[in-house]
Structure formats: structure tokens, C-alpha cells
Image (cartoon, helix red, strand yellow):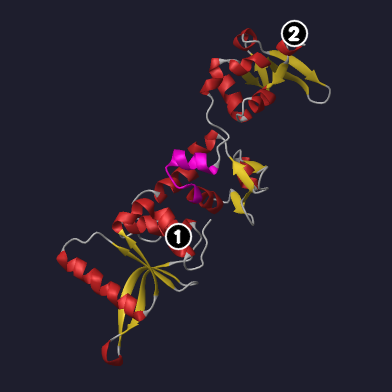
Amino acid sequence: MQDKQAHKHLSTTALARAIGKDSKELFILLANSGWIVKVDGQWHLTEKGRFEGGTYANHPKYGEYIVWPESLRQHSVLRLLPDAPLSARNLSQKLNLPARLVNLLLAERGWIKRHVHGWHLTERGEALGGQQHVSDSTAIPFVTWPESLLENPQLKLAAQQLSSSAATCTDGHPSGSAGRALIDNWLYVAGLTHAVDYTLVLPGSAGGTERLTVDFYLPQHQIAIVYWRKPAGPGELAEHLDAREKLKTAHFSIIEIEYDQLNNLDEMLARELMQHSIAVY
């Protein structure tokens, strides 16, 4: 039994599955390491690959394919494999974005679509190497991705926009400031229709009215979002306090974002929106 087990061989795909890695990434690694080479669309062993124990097997339907000794699972070269497949949380760590925003960003690109709970892979996402899974414990669908997705130009650009102060936001709105760009991009990726520099009509003195412009307005929910920038001096601070008092007196639904809350924007905005019965997953 031990001798039979010692001579057990695995296909490249089965080897990848056995070590919990993505098969596409394993083929790339073995090719880059000089173990295999593709000729006319088929993988062939090199002398190096044969030296490492690679050989061929035949399948009655699919023909000849490469197999490897199971002992190769412990080979040092496999430590060079990336941490694939990558979950949304893995991607979030590598992109330095909150996991919630990563899924929303992938959905905005058209690579996944929302399920009742969880996410389903689209054809466009599958073409990029995405794989559909279902949690054994919760039955919630989720998607994993190859490491190569991190080099996708669309993803890199969108991730950069979500974490930078570009002059123009992802949806084309002018940013106005670094803080406003972060907020605008978050609202866009979250799928929340919003206006920028929206003018509210507030009740004024002696039965009149006055106008006050807020940074963002969610028309479907009638919520104003105000970003309180870091005051440049006493005069600007006084203007902030006056505007805040007018908004409070007018009984508008307001979400206020302070300058020092930008580093925790995802959690803060999601929590504030939930208090207005708006769930962002």
C-alpha cells in the first residue's frame, strides 16, 4: 500500500487542487520555471520537468496529459505560488480597500452580480478567471479570483480612484477636494444615486427662505451629506457651525462627515446609512 501510494501521480489541475491553489497559476509557475512548455496549444514536458518527476498519462477521451508525483506537493518551487484563489477579503488586503467596497467595485465592473445574500459570477467575470463557490455552512454564494486579476487595468484604475484625490471622480463629478472625491467614489460604487453641490431651500427669518448648498444629496432617500473640511481658520469654522445649526433647525435628514473620519469612511458611512434604513452590503 505504501509503495503504491508513493508512486501515485496527479494531473497539474489535480495537483493544484491538492495544495489549495489555482490551476491557472500553477501552469504559469511551471512554465516560468522551465518545467513545461506550450506547443500548438498543448503542454509538453521539458527536460527539467522530466527531471522533477513529470511524465505522461493517457485518457480515453482527452488523450495525453502531464502528471506529477504526489510527492511534488512538498517541492519548494510551489511556495512561489500566489495566494490564489483570492476572496474579496484577500483582494481588499492587496488593494488596500475595505472588503465591502471590493465586492461593490467588482459588481460595478460587471464581473459579479448581487444575490439575495452573497454574489454570483457573471460571464464577464468567468472570462477573467473568477470561480463560483457556495459556503458549506451558510449556502451563501461567493466568488474567488486568480492573482492575475490584480493586474487588470480596469481594476487597478478603479481601486486607485477609490483611494486617491483625483480631480475627477469615478462617475465624472468634479471632486472639489480629496475628501469629497473619496466620498463621491464611495457613493457611486455603492450604487447610490447622488447629486453634488445640491442647493437646499431652508426656512429663513420673518417667514422667508434662504439657500444652503450641501456637498451631496441622495434624491431617492432625501438625505443630505455634508463633509466638514478641516477649517482653514476661525472664519471658516464659524461658517461651518452656522450651516450646521441651520440644517438642524430645518429638520433635514443629514449625514455629517468630519475630516478625521475619512480614514474610516466605509464603516462610518455604512453605519450612518443603515440608521436611515439604507443597507450597503
Q: Which mark is residue 3?
A: 2
Residue 114: x percent and y percent? 61, 55
**From the viewer's perspective, is 86 left or right of 257?**
right
Residue placed under numbered mark 1 in the picture = 271
Task: Please say if 96 is above or below 43.
Answer: below
Decide whether residue 9 is among the magenta residues.
no
> Which callout, 1 or 2, points at the residue further toward the start of the chain?
2
The crowding category of the residue bearing disc 1, from other C-alpha atoms within 10 Å (few below 14, some 14 to 19, many at least 20), is some
Q: Mark 2 falls on what kind of element?
A: helix
Residue at 61% over, 43% down: 143
Name the kind of residue labelled 1 in the image: Arg
Most prominent secondary structure in the magenta stretch?
helix
* Quadrant in which the N terminus is drawn: top right
* Residue at image location 15% in from the left, 65% down from the top: 234
Tell me the residue at 51%/39% (across/down).
Answer: 90
Q: Where is residue 26, by image quadrant?
A: top right
- Picture residue at 66% right of the left edge, 23% below the top: 15
| Magenta-colored span | 88-100
